[in-house]
Image (cartoon, rainbow, N blue to C red):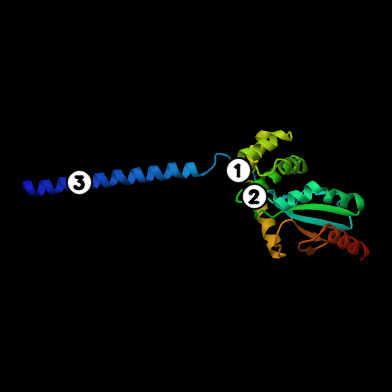
Amino acid sequence: MSKQSKNKHQRRSRSQWILAAVAAVIVIGGVILLSNSNPTMSATSVSAARLNEDPSLGPANAPVTLMEYGDFGCPTCRSWYLSGIRDQILKQFNGEVRYVWRDFPIITSQSPKAAEAGQCAFDQGKFFEYQDAIYHDFGKLSVSDLKNFAAQVGLDTAKFDQCLDSGQYAAKVQQSLNEARQLPVQATPAWVVNGQYLYNASPEALTQAIEKALAQ
């Protein structure tokens, strides 16, 4: 082999080695990125029954179901809550109305994660205590805030954090969101009385709709 051919062969070998090294770095980097993109905590699978279960107040066999589509980042939802209208309706129609909460997280970019947090609190039987904490300290919806609320209302924080960090209820929240859009819900809070959607309802309109449903 001539000296020129030998040098050419060496350059080719060196180029092939460099390409192989670069490829190896890319593969290793890709593995690292992939491992970092997946949370160390995996989401617990949610049963079909749980996907269809929602926080509620009142007897399950009540003749009227009052459903609220709400958002923890919604100022109007908060105003309705703090006014006590929901509790007044349940007291007025004692045993005849079942109240159900459905997530419609559209107001802020943090609302979907806050909705997931509510579902995690519901798993521990304290959805309404959690809702109360959020609405009384309104506007704090970062992940750290959501975890602080969990501790504040006495949840098992390890279980709550695992639930929230894993995105366990992302599908549940999305399902509720899709159902609201099919109605179609246009704002929060939105109310549904025995399947009848009431747009921009007043407390009086809700009462009338419930009375009408009871009379049927």
The dot on residue 103 is none
Mark 3 neighbour density, 10 Å: few (under 14) some (14–19) many (20 or more): few
Q: CA distance from mark 1 to mark 2?
A: 17 Å
Mark 1 neighbour density, 10 Å: few (under 14) some (14–19) many (20 or more): some
SS category of the residue bearing label 2:
helix
Task: Give the mark, 3 or 2, whose residue is nearer the N terminus.
Answer: 3
Q: Which residue bears the numbered disc 2? A: 111
Percent from the top left, x then y, of residue 150? 69, 37
Q: CA distance from mark 3 to mark 2?
A: 57 Å
Percent from the top left, x then y, of residue 86? 83, 51
**Which picture quadrant has residue 181?**
bottom right
Position above or below: 105 against 39: below
Q: CA distance from mark 1 to mark 3?
A: 48 Å
Mark 2 neighbour density, 10 Å: few (under 14) some (14–19) many (20 or more): many
Nearer the camera: disc 1 or disc 2: 2
SS category of the residue bearing label 1:
helix
Instruction: Name the amino acid, label 1.
Output: Ser
**Residue beneath the point at 93% across and 64% down:** 215
Q: Which residue bears the numbered disc 1? A: 166
Q: Which residue bears the numbered disc 3? A: 13
**Which picture quadrant has residue 117?**
top right
Nearer the camera: disc 3 or disc 2: 2
Instruction: Name the amino acid, label 2.
Output: Ser
Task: Give the mark, 1 or 2, whose residue is nearer the N terminus.
Answer: 2
Instruction: Name the amino acid, label 3.
Output: Ser
Residue 187 visible somewhere in the drawing: yes
